[in-house]
Image (cartoon, grey):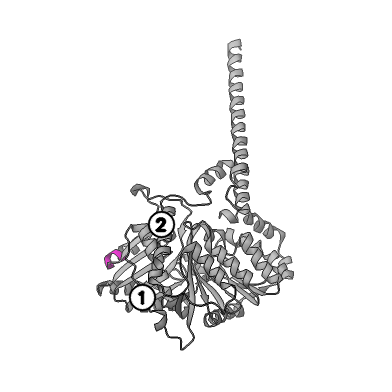
Amino acid sequence: MSKSALSGSEKKKRKRSWWAILLLVVDYTVKIVAVGTVPENRKTGSSFAWLMLILFVPVLGLPLFLILGSPYVQGRRHRLQGEVNDYVARTWPKHAGKEPDLTDYPGAESIVASNRRLVSFPLAAGRHEKLHGNSEDSVRAMAAAVDKATSEVHVEIYIMAWDQTTDVFFTALADAVKRGVKVRLLFDHIGTRGYPGYKEFLARMTDAGIEWHRMMPIDPLHGRWRRPDLRNHRKLLVVDGVVGFMGSQNMIDSSYLKPKNVELGRRWKDLNIEVTGPIVDSLAAVFAIDWYTETKEKLEFVSRAATEESLSDADGRKAAFQLVPSGPGFPTEPNLRMFVSLMHRAQKSLIITSPYFIPEDSLLGAITTAAYRGVNVELFVSEQADQFMVQHAQRSYYKMLLEAGVKIYLYPKPTVLHAKHFTIDDEISVIGSSNMDMRSFALDYEIMLLGFGEILASELAEVQDGYREVSHLLTADEWELEPWYRKYVDNVMRLTSDIQ
C-alpha cells in the first residue's frame, strides 16, 4: 500500500470520528435543552412523560414533541374561542333571566362562579325530561324530537354513521328538510372517517339536503390543517332551540360497525340526558360557536327556550343547570377544576362512572381524600376497555384507590361502559362527554352538564344501581394476586398517560 492510500484511509476514519462527535454533541444538546424547556407551563406528569420519550428515544420523541407537545393550542381556533367567550360574557345577560338560587347547596355558589368565570356560561333553569340509557331507545327519542321540529335542527356529534340503528334518526333529519326545516350537522373528521360507509354517509346527507361540515378537518390540499391529536368529542342535539340532548353517545350502532366487535359481542353502553328550558340556550350557544369556527357563518342567537316561569315543576324535574364546555380553547381546563372542586365538597357519597379513568394528580387526590374522609366513593369502569394502553394505564391506579377505600366496580366484558357521569351526596350531578383523563381535559372539545336537584341525582343513582348489580367488586386481596408482568405493563403505560 502507498503512503497516499494509507493517508486516505486515515482521513475517512477521522471524518467518521468527527461525525460521531457532532452527533453526540447534538444529542446531548437536545437533551439538555429539553430538560430546561419541556417543564415550562406544563404539569409534572406530562413533563416527565415527554422527557422520558425525548431522552430515551430522541429520534421519535423530539419530532412528536415539536408537533404535539405544546400544552396550549394557539392560532386561529384559540383566538376564535377567546373572542366567543368574551361575546358570550357580554351578551348573555340580554337573554338570561335571574340565575336560580343555590342556598340549599352550601359551597356550590363558588363552584358555579368559577365555571362562569372560566367559560362564561351562566347558571340556568331547566327541566330534566329523561335519561336515555339504551342506545337504540336514545336514537329513537332523538328522532322523535326531530320529527316535531318546525324551524331548525342542530346536530353535533363526534362519531356518526348512517346505519341500520341510526337510520331512523337520519331519516327524521331528511324528512325535516322536506318540511322546510333547516338542518345543520357537525361531526369530527378523524373521529368519523374510519368507520364503514363513510363516503356513502356523506353522499346520503348531501342528497337529503342536510348541511354538514367536518369538525377539526385535516385537509392540506384545501389549506385545512391543525394538530392531528385534537378532537371535537362533543355530543349534542338542539331542536328548535327548545329541547336538547347531550351525553356520551355517538350516532352509530353500539357495535361501532366493527366486525371484531360483532364477533365478540362487544357493545358500548352510554347515557344521554334530555333537557328543556333556558339551559337549552347554552347548548344552542355551544353549537353556534362550533359552527362559526368551522364555517365562519354566524348564527343569530335568539332564545326560543321556555322561560323559567313557564317551566312546570309538578313532578319535581325543574332544576338549576350549568353547561361547562372545555377543550383546547380553554387552557384553564374548566372541567377538571369543576370535577376537583365538587369532589372536595362531597360529604356523604361520590359515585363515579368513567370509561377511561386516568386521573390527573389533583383529581386523584380529590377522590382518595374524599375516601379517607369517610365519604362513600364508588368507581364504575369497564372490566376491559377497548384500548390497550388506556386499559393498562387505568389499572395502574387501582392499588392506590383500593388502599384509600374506594370501591371499584368492574362492568363485565365484552360491554364497554362508555357513560360519563358522577353524583355528589345524592343532590348534585354531572353528565356529559368528558372522560376522566388528560386528553379530555386538555385536548378534546367536551361539554359537561352540572345539575342541582334530588330527582336527577336519584335517577342517576338508579342507573348506577343497575351497573352495580351486574358488576364485579374488585377487592384489595384480589388485586394483590394480579401477576407481576401485568402490573409491569400497567406501570409502563401509566408513564405515557399524560401524552396518550
State the mark number for residue 274.
none
Front one among 248 and 327: 327
Percent position of residue 455, x then y: 52, 83
* Kind of residue indicated by mark 1: Val
- Visible in this render: residue 41? yes
Q: Is residue 326 magenta?
A: no
Against 211, residue 35 (above or below) is above
State the mark number for residue 83.
2
Percent position of residue 350, x then y: 62, 74
Q: Quadrant of residue 245?
A: bottom left
Q: Quadrant of the C terminus?
A: bottom right
Q: Is residue 207 magenta?
A: yes
* Kind of residue indicated by mark 2: Glu
Crowding near the residue tagged with mark 1, few <14, some 14–19, many ≥20 C-alpha atoms within 10 Å = some
Percent position of residue 208, x then y: 28, 68
- Which callout, 2 or 1, points at the residue further toward the start of the chain? 2
* 390 left or right, relative to 181: right
Label 2 to label 1, Cα distance in Å? 38 Å
Q: Quadrant of residue 291?
A: bottom left
Write the start and end of the magenta stretch as one range. Answer: 204-208
Q: Which residue is pictured at 61% across the width and 32% down the height?
A: 25
Q: Quadrant of residue 154?
A: bottom left
- Visible in this render: residue 160? no
Q: Main secondary structure of the magenta part?
A: helix
Residue at the spot of label 1: 168
Q: Which residue is pictured at 39% across the width and 83% down the height?
A: 310
